Image (tube, grey):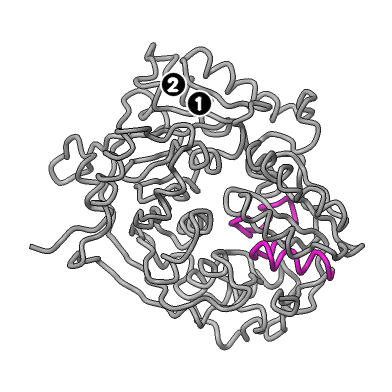
Amino acid sequence: MAGKTLFEKIWEKHVVTTVEGGPSVLYIDRHFVHEVTSPQAFDGLRNRGIKVRQPQKTVATADHNIPTLGQDQPIRDELSRFQVNKLAENCKEFGVPLYGLNHPWNGIVHVIGPELGITQPGMTIVCGDSHTSTHGAFGSIAFGIGTSEVEMVLATQTLLQNKPKTMRINIEGELGKGVMSKDIVLYIISQIGTGGATGYFVEFAGSAIRSLSMEARMTICNMSIEMGARGGMIAPDETTFEYIKGREFAPKGADWDKAVEAWRQLPSDPDAVFDKELTFRASDIEPMITYGTNPGMGIGISKSIPNTEDIEEATRPTFQKSLQYMEFKPGEPMLGKKVDYVFVGSCTNGRIEDLRAFAQFVKGKKKADNVTAWIVPGSRQVEAQAEKEGLRKILEEAGFEMRQPGCSACLAMNDDKIPEGNYAVSTSNRNFEGRQGPGARTMLASPITAAAAAITGKITDPRDFL
């Protein structure tokens, strides 16, 4: 009998029962909640007179709607203020722990889970947010759910789920100069497309993946959703254990030893069979940049936008529509294109390592006059760490401003919107039309590619400075 994959091991341990010929009832270990997808779910419980089944396994934070300046003042935007206040009311009524605005543990939901040690290997983790896949970097089954499913988990601590297929994507070899984990995932999506992993749970493996830090792994799993996957995961190893150890909610003492022993059994067995397997060479990856309106429309920064005849006939209309929106032409190089805004932050790249990489790159240089840059830590803890390490000082000396934590310009749900027609190099995860504001034009990139654009005022190969 063939061995089991990491996914299968966790899934099987969490199945409560299976409907014959239908979905499984899956037990959920951790449920993260934020202000956008939870109000209707709490209303549903209230209307039916139901309590939250296991409030201690639920964690709430405010992130999407909060401003990144003046957080000590009342929120100006009426809808945002309502959403954030409603979350506080609901959490108080239902006994759910909340790390709201100005709490020392406040931050983006997918940043605070790992940094507090709430996210651990072998867990099932859900949240009403597609980028919940981030937590899979710890060797857990983590995925986004809809509002009605949020209500179901609050009420029962379980979820009806059809078992997805499994895929393994291997990245083998050493990464080149200036290549970050964001470039790895943008490269994979450019190769397989935004639907290339639809119906699958993806395990990322190979020597290049194993060499990454935990924060870099989170970036990759975060964007697994952009290739159509149900979620992404990476097998836990010494890097994982070292990261979790000593964190607020991590097991302690004998419990820690017992947990690590169990976590060591999780990686896919050597003879495990995946429904699909792909392998890429790390040496083929260079710093990436997107040119279109989905994350799959990415190229190596030294390359040119494809010509129309090089695009598959079925996707040509999308390709042409995207270029029209971006005001780019087929066959043009990306290098040298003007940049108006630079955004460093989000659940993809708002962690301390991202801020360190950006600050290190701009140290001793000056921000271009034509660029507005928003550097946004993913949490209060990241902000405090950046202060402690002197990153704010480095940024300010180079002409940058570090804002307060939140989802910020990843999505147009707060004050940080890119104005219509402007070009933004963004370290977030999506570049759809209007994602960063009506008419905004987004180019996804890594923190150091964003840094190169911020100091030159145009798309620039970061390797020129390294």
Residue drawn 44% across the image and 78% down it: 173
Give the answer, above or below, for where 4 lies relative to 179. Answer: above
Q: Position of residue 215 (x, y in %)?
A: 53, 54
Q: Which residue is mark 2?
A: 44
Contact check, label 1 and label 2, Cβ < 8 Å: yes
Q: Nearer the viewer, residue 274 or 253?
A: 253
Give the answer, above or below, for where 395 lies relative to 281. Answer: above
Question: Within 10 angstroms of label 1, few (less than 14), some, or many (20 or more) residues?
Answer: some
- Secondary structure beneath disc 2? helix
Q: Is residue 445 magenta?
A: yes
| Distance from Cα at disc 1 to Cα at disc 2 | 6 Å
Amino acid type at image mark 1: Gln
Residue drawn 33% across the image and 59% down it: 200
Which quadrant: the N terminus? bottom left
Q: Which residue is mark 1?
A: 40
Which quadrant: the C terminus? bottom right
Q: Nearer the viewer, residue 183 or 159?
A: 183
Q: Position of residue 452 (x, y in %)?
A: 76, 69
Residue drawn 37% across the image and 14% down it: 50
Magenta residues? 428-456
Question: Within 10 angstroms of label 2, few (less than 14), some, or many (20 or more) residues?
Answer: some
